[in-house]
Amino acid sequence: MSDVFGNHKTTRGCFMQIQMNASGGQGAVLRLPAASPSQLPASLGDPLLVTGFSTSKVDATTHVKTFGGNVYTYAFGHDPNQSVLDVTVTAFLGQDSGVVGQLLSAYTAGRVSASSAKAKLALGSSEVVSGYLVGQSSQTQSSEYNMQVFTFRIAIVEA
């Protein structure tokens, strides 16, 4: 088995062990609208990779309790204001890599107020979920190894 972290010649991403002998071989990829490059990681040589993601989908509901003890539930379908996808990208900050600027520029160009196109998360060759880029955060994961974590927040507008 190769590196658990996913830095192998033919495989990258958070599903490296599963994809090791598969034909897909790319792992997780985040495609951002209007950004350059248009996907993260852009290539196997990129000093960053998708290390995790989490989703939350919520239906809009209201519960009404009556005097007789009955509870009525009204369902209004998918609630896009509370349904989100968070994609975590880990960047390896080498000398003069420009990765931080690249990721900040990718957010600025791809956010919903700047682009009406959707961001997409793909695992291997399959697109998993898409939505509008609505937020970005960053924190240092390891100062010893120069690793920075960027999280892109995507609003899931379709059920």
Image (spheres, rainbow, N blue to C red):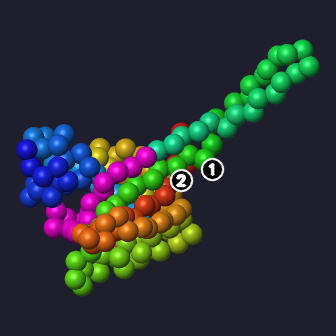
Q: Position of residue 87 (x, y in %)?
A: 40, 55
Q: Residue at x 76, y 29 (%)?
A: 63
Q: Earlier in the sequence, mark 1 or mark 2?
A: 1
Q: Quadrant of residue 98?
A: bottom left
Position of residue 28 relative to residue 32, above or below, is above
User: Dot 2 lies on which element?
Assistant: strand
Q: Position of residue 159 (x, y in %)?
A: 53, 39
Along the horizontal axis of the image, is 56 left or right of 41?
right
Q: Residue at x 30, y 75 (%)?
A: 99
Q: Label 1: which residue?
A: 81
Q: Residue at x 85, y 16 (%)?
A: 69
The amino acid beneath tag 2 is Ala
User: Dot 1 lies on which element?
Assistant: loop
The amino acid beneath tag 1 is Asn
Q: Label 2: which residue?
A: 155
User: What residue span does the magenta drawing correspond to?
Assistant: 34-54
Residues at badges 1 and 2 in contact (C-beta under 8 Å)?
yes
